[in-house]
Amino acid sequence: MRMGHRTFVSVAAAAIAALSGNADAESFPIRPVTIIVPLAAGGPTDTLARIVADGMTRSLGQSVLVENVTGAAATIGVAKAVHAPADGYTVSIGNWFTHVLNGATYSLSYDLLNDFTPVALLTDNPLLIVGRKGLPAKDLTQLIAWLRQNPDTAMEGTSGVGSASHVGGLLFQKLSGTQFRFIPYRGAAPAMQDLVAGRIDLMFDQVSSSLPYVRGGQVVGYAVAAKDRSPIAPDIPTVDEAGLPDLHLSIWHALWVPRGTPQGVVARLNAAAVAALASPTVRERLSALGHTIRPVDQQTSVALSTFQRAEIEKWWPVVKAAGITLD
């Protein structure tokens, strides 16, 4: 069958594009790579990004820079990353809040699943259920029993409406059959201050942030919201062990690039991220911050794609059922 001129041109163009993509992947990178952090400098995501960027620099042979683009609950920075050229030189770092929860609480200019290509799943930082001293509950089972006996009496401090601590509390209520009031704060720190002072009863806070208060005897640590015990808190049971399975909520972090980035470039970035996470120096620095590095078989692009989709399917119904909208 003869090939028409227009068809021939289309096929030739596709072939050239494919060859060009392969060539780009083989030479990538030839200039610095930028990781866009959609949150403030000095925060947990920014700190993690800089540690990982240092490790990736060694593997890529080019500088990996960090740029903070903040505003509108991280949506401005994520939008900038997703609309960047799909060449691998702009990478988006995000977490459970920026790449899962925001899709349920905001009308976004981008699609969290279809406008990104996943690169690598990095770390977990699970939440810890903590309570004020003086609560009549020594463990999670007793805490749930007390909450059931005193509906709408207890107060849980949150980092704000729609935050991880708020959504974690909603799922806790659903799974445990309890009811309590939510008290929003401008961040976890002031909420923890009130918990220590006994002005509120509960918090769902990151292990790394709340553990010093548990160790100091200022609050009680009931359970880690994860399948496995935290390496920095091995003496605190998981929610599964404590009697409330499936209450798993972690502030995990990952890397993405814009959709259409050549697969070879994605593979190169993934290999650099995996190599960084294998570095003893990087592992030590992240562990000190309370991060648990994902196993190697979970650091792949495919694993991140599957995991992110599962997180969206799990959390969006919880948020939407509670009527949480932040537009």
Image: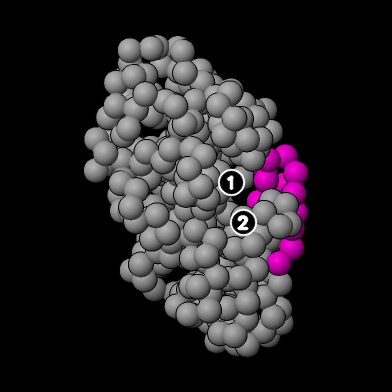
Q: Quadrant of the N terminus?
A: bottom left
- What amino acid is labelled 1 in the image? Thr
**Residue placed at 24% from the left, 35% from the top?**
243
Q: Position of residue 208 (x, y in %)?
A: 51, 53
Q: CA distance from mark 1 to mark 2?
A: 11 Å
Q: Position of residue 212 (x, y in %)?
A: 52, 50
Residue 77 sits inside the magenta stretch? yes
Q: Which residues are magenta?
A: 66-78
Which quarter of the figure has residue 2?
bottom left
Q: Position of residue 159 (x, y in %)?
A: 60, 34
**Residue placed at 43% from the left, 38% from the top?**
220
The earlier-in-sequence mark between 1 and 2 is: 2
Q: Secondary structure at mark 1?
A: helix
Can the viewer see residue 101?
yes
Identify which residue, 67 or 177, lies in the foreground.
Answer: 177
In this rendering, position of residue 129 left or right of residue 104: left
Can the viewer see residue 167?
no
In this rendering, position of residue 7 left or right of residue 321: right
Mark 1 and mark 2 in contact? Answer it, CB < 8 Å: yes
Q: Give the labeled residue for mark 1.
A: 98
- What amino acid is labelled 2 in the image? Thr
The crowding category of the residue bearing disc 2, from other C-alpha atoms within 10 Å (few below 14, some 14 to 19, many at least 20), is many
Q: Give the labeled residue for mark 2.
A: 45
Q: Nearer the viewer, mark 1 or mark 2?
A: 2
Check the image and tell me how it is coloured: one colour
Residue 35 sits inside the magenta stretch? no
**Residue placed at 47% from the left, 49% from the top?**
215
**Residue placed at 56% from the left, 31% from the top?**
195
In this rendering, position of residue 65 left or right of residue 247: right
The crowding category of the residue bearing disc 1, from other C-alpha atoms within 10 Å (few below 14, some 14 to 19, many at least 20), is some
From this view, report whether residue 159 is shown above or below residue 153.
below
